[in-house]
Amino acid sequence: GIQVEQSPPDLILQEGANSTLRCNFSDSVNNLQWFHQNPWGQLINLFYIPSGTKQNGRLSATTVATERYSLLYISSSQTTDSGVYFCAGGGLYNFNKFYFGSGTKLNVKP
Amino acid sequence: ETGVTQTPRHLVMGMTNKKSLKCEQHLGHNAMYWYKQSAKKPLELMFVYNFKEQTENNSVPSRFSPECPNSSHLFLHLHTLQPEDSALYLCASSLHWTGEIRNYGYTFGSGTRLTVV
């Protein structure tokens, strides 16, 4: 299967700071998604972004499919942004199956 | 509420018990999935169903038995589990890939936190 590497594994921010999370894939992906897992375990879909750039409020994401990576930008972080961020990608021949990274654990301090 | 509902939210069961997890979606999706999330491990895909037909079994032990009666409902039947099966079990749904440009992203349920004693 596809190997997904996320960095950094842990991140501590002061409220108001900006950050960039990265996701690298071992093979080409046609499907790519970013999720936020809250302390109760709920995985919230942030972006479905096989390519290009999308923005949603303080969050934005960019995927460069040809170079097999995606970035998630968090601006003006808030304590409610804390949790674990996962990226997941699906390959060329099995689009329905997503491979997940190990996540970036973010802690935003007030 | 995401549109994917999982019940129960929490489950404690003995190793000799039989229980079932339920997942229901009302998003018009036609693919459904079971994932397992253990502490300090990436999410592990267990089963994939497309149009209620199983298309993936990721070498899951037979003590986990999935059932998909239709595209909106998915069950995971559990029997004679081991303590190491304790984990968060997540259900997701999506559109089945057709080659058209559409949103094929997953929507997850809230999960069932399972403890095997």
Image (spheres, coloured by chain):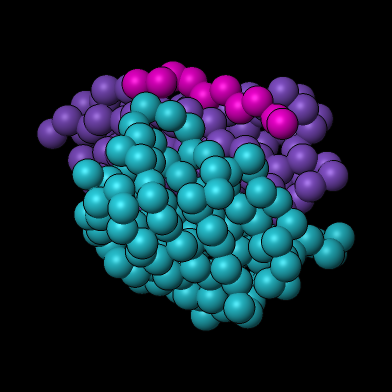
The image shows a total of numbered marks equal to 0
Name the foreground residue: A30 vs B85. Answer: B85
Which quarter of the rendered picture does the C terminus of chain A lie within? Answer: top left
Residue at 35% over, 21% down:
A10
> Eyeballing the image, is A59 above or below A10?
below
Query: Residue most toward the left?
Result: A110
Name the foreground residue: A83 vs B59. Answer: B59
> Eyeballing the image, is A15 above or below A54?
above
- Note the chain letter of the purple one: A
* Horizontal and vertical percent position of residue A22: 54, 26
Magenta stretch, residue numbers: A1-10
* Horizontal and vertical percent position of residue B14: 25, 51
Residue at 30% over, 38% down:
B83
Q: Quadrant of residue B18?
A: bottom left
| Image hue for chain B | cyan
Visible in this render: residue A75? no
Q: Quadrant of residue B90?
A: bottom left
Residue at 61% over, 53% down:
B47
User: Is A32 left, or right, of A28 in this rendering?
Assistant: left
User: Is A71 left, or right, of B111 in this rendering?
Assistant: right
